[in-house]
Image (cartoon, coloured by chain):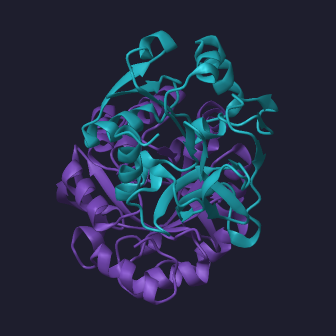
Chain colours: A cyan, B purple
Amino acid sequence: MTTAIVDTSTANIASVRYALERLGARYKLAETPDEASECDRIILPGVGAAGPAMTRLKATGWAQALQGDQRPLLGVCLGMQLLFDYSVESDCELLGLIPGRVERLDPGSDGPWPHMGWNTLTPVKSDEPLLEGVTDGAHVYFVHGFYTPLSAHTSASTHYGIGITAIARKGHVAGCQFHPERSAKTGAQILTNFVKGAA
Amino acid sequence: MLARRIIPCLDVRDGRVVKGVRFQNHEDVGGIEELARRYAEEGADELVFYDISASPSGRTVEPEWVGRVAQAIDIPFCVAGGIRSLEHARARLFGGADKISINTPALENPGLIDAMAKEFGSQCVVVGIDSRVIDGDWRCHKNTGDPSKTSTEHRKTLDWIREVVDRGAGEIVLNCMDQDGVREGYDIDQLAAAREACSVPLIASGGAGAMDHFRDVFQKADVDGALAASVFHKAVIAIPDLKAWLSAEGVEIRL
């Protein structure tokens, strides 16, 4: 069981790698899809803006490859947002693996923008495999200014001004808006669920 | 609901964690990874590593220990001290730091904030501000890690907060110097004024000495996080006790 980490050349790659090392999970950093051919699952990390990230995924061949891939896929933070159709952040088309749009978050009176810190996870779907062993209301670490609204593909939500999709899933494609690699024991459990075979 | 954050700050000098009173007379309080791991396990929500010798002496933090911290802990951390260029910032972020914090270099070259926000995103750009009253106004100070080089920067603190947020800072750490290390409580007046001026997350620093200081700064100054050093390093307050008490006092906390 080896997990490919898509080398998006963004700053949280090191954190994701170290998190898998703490779990004792094998991984391979894959700049191109060919380098991930032996892997049985894929993590798409990312921080920063959607536009430059999509440009890079297209240049490396990953965008097209992910659109045809059937292996379990986990997007993290920006990597989760890239799974959707469209982002207002960079006015750009995304991978289109999960229906929906990425919108600018308006926290209202709940606090400052962006949404930064530990917020609670509320399960929406009881059969979400990433949440096995995770307590309802557990805190995970979020850092984002754009978000995907609640939809039929929301597996877990959080709330900051408005309902936010915290975990999204459509079939083998899933994503976490928060950073499981920086979410203490809860994050480690979610990553364990993914690398140990949650589809 | 978003939880208020408890943030131990580890002042680093020559590869060790130190703590002084009003920025002076530093004493050794432990090793970097050892303290980082202990605080993460005790329930700290985030850690800040501040190389207090970096700015005055022209050195920078060693990216090598940044990587070791990133491997050791599973909570976010910020690295501060002597980051004067995009390359300095990149080395620390790609080494595994979640955020970088700039203080004196931002005062000397405010465009650095814009450049870092554009390159890495506002979410990882923190501006630290050392502030105290001079001539009836809160004003920023530079090079506070070395008393012989500490100087009064004449910018007014609240104006500076507005400017750095406009330039793309994603978070502000306001260190109230008169309170630093003396454990008599956070500077509620200054922090409440900063809260009004600050549209991004605001972290209080300087003065924590008892549990009710944390409750007061969350409830009266509405800050997003509270940073403290000596009360944690010297075991005056245990983080699990503090978090349980704050939760019972009605503060939203990650337990």
Percent x, y for residue B232?
28, 70
Q: Position of residue A99 (x, y in %)?
A: 74, 40
Q: Residue at x 38, y 86 (%)?
A: B245
Horizontally, is B60 left or right of A94 in the view? Answer: left
- Residue B10 appears at what percent x and percent y? 32, 56
Q: Position of residue B134 (x, y in %)?
A: 58, 69
**Residue B205 against residue B152 in the figure, above or below:** below
B223 lies above or below A14: below
Residue at horizontal 68 percent and vertical 19 percent from the top:
A55
Which quadrant would residue B171 be assigned to in this image?
A: bottom right
Query: Which quadrant is home to the N terminus of chain A?
Result: top left
Q: Is residue B224 above or below residue A41?
A: below
Residue drawn 37% across the image and 35% down it: B60
Specify whether residue B130 is in view. no
Dividing the picture into quadrants, the one containing residue B41 is bottom left
**Number of labelled discs?**
0
* Closest to the observer, A193 or A101: A193
Asked if residue B103 shows in the view, the reply is yes
Viewer-closest of B239 and B208: B239
Name which residue lies at 28% across and 67% down: B42
